[in-house]
Amino acid sequence: MRIQIRKIQWAAISLVILISACGHGETMSGFSTLSSPDVLSDNAVGDFKQANEESKTTFSIDVDTASYSITRSTIEGGQLPAIDSVRLEEFINYFDYSYDEPELGFAFAVHTEVGSATWNNDNRLLKIGIKGKTINAEERGNSNLVFLIDTSGSMSQQNKLPLLKKSLNALVDQLTIDDHIAIVTYAGTSGVALDSTTGDQKDKIKQAIDSLISQGSTNGESGINLAYSLASANFQSEGINRVILATDGDFNVGQTNPDALVELIKSKAEGGIFLTALGFGLYSNDYTMEKLADNGNGNYAYIDSLNEAKKALVDNINGTLITIAKDVKIQVNFDPAVVAQYRLLGYKNRILNNEDFEDDSKDAGDIGAGHTVTAFYEVVLQPNIVAASDVEIASLSLRYKQPNEEISELIEATISDGGDVSEDFLFAAAVAEFALILEDSAYKGNASYDSVLTLSETNKGADLRGYRQGFIDLVNKAKLLE
């Protein structure tokens, strides 16, 4: 396939383009949850757009994965997920893909592929994949981490505080003398369970974790204020500053207005203290946790097992802790002479107005070290265009900011159809097809569990950590429930 790249400003990004037209359970008791956007039907954000009427499309990237693990817990509990809990992009981004590393000195590589839509062979799939540069532990630099731990009575269940303690102990094993750790707890009142301590004092840190008990109501406001105060007091001007919130989302004492909490977290992020949100136990409005993490320039994961904890806090620890770029926006401009219609799969609460692309005051998604981010468009070509014919179908623009900068940098590239697709492309397409089935999309076409299974089993690849086999097992369970 043919690729043309134009570098508009100096930028820590390398582009290699690949194209492919390719929450749940208990209510957050007493917590006035953020209003989740109205459930977006396919006739809204996910509908096909006419390229001759609206050729540009803009969205914010997302590296959250919680929707997939919440869905997994729901299916393993014997139920199919609620339609509005399925966020397709979080299904796809749960898995790593073998995108090449950026060239030396660059922050990103961007890869694309194009192939047939597996659920509708008449359409094309456009895949845009971003790979953040990998940073090793010894390159991480000093870190200032504050664990903000919910120790309220609602956290007593085995899949909550007991699992949380095991998860944090697994994280502690990854820490070095350059990592500084503090622990703040919150229940009826908040307190400091551990003052800032270097990561080589593992026994001391683990003792503090193991001594945590659940009791009382949940004063989220008090805990958050104390955690950020402690993070500010130990601020590392050239390092990592992050609050790691671990909770079942049950805020019922103090400031229960999450909009006010969002503003607090957003203001702290602007000052260089970012937020990671970890959800434990099943709850209905995970949108709130997602929103807190988004405004904290961080990421949101749902921990339903020790294996999932190790994925987020051990295997992907540097991606969890180190932000390499913030406010990352993508804009695709389709050529109406080649493309008749297009639609973005997923990212329903990440859509931006086209004019927001050049507005640096508009918040967008963030990328951690080593993270991969993937987005899919389903494309209908004009009748006179032959698929996979090396024809240019769109241009791509990407804006991002360095973690400590407020002025964005711009990358531009052109995208052409053509070329063979990879195992990664086909496996990712299978994951997207599964999400289309679960959300009962009006555009699921010929999607079926059998198709998903055949595609994912054939294209599982090396699967060194077993995540893809876990997906196959999950699809089989969903098929039985259906």
Image: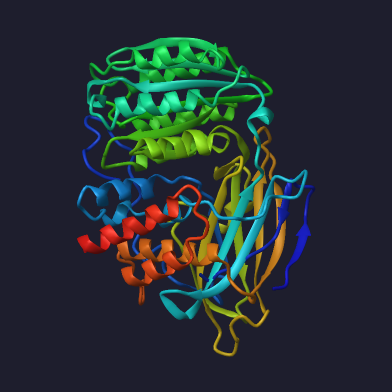
In screen coordinates, is 456 left or right of 107? left
Percent x, y of residue 175: 55, 23
Percent x, y of residue 169: 43, 23
Q: Is residue 213 above or below residue 365?
A: above
Q: Is residue 150 visible?
A: yes
Number of numbered discs: 0
Q: Is residue 427 above or below residue 35?
A: below
Q: Identify the residue at image location x=68%, y=49%.
A: 108
Q: Quadrant of the C terminus?
A: bottom left
Q: Identify the residue at image location x=55%, y=52%.
A: 373
Q: Is residue 354 above or below residue 139?
A: below
Q: Identify the residue at image location x=60%, y=27%.
A: 272
Quadrant in the rendering for residue 387: bottom right
In screen coordinates, is 465 left or right of 272? left
Q: Nearer the viewer, residue 355 or 315?
A: 315
Percent x, y of residue 413: 71, 63
Percent x, y of residue 240: 61, 26
In screen coordinates, is 16 left or right of 432? right
Q: Identify the residue at image location x=37%, y=61%.
A: 435
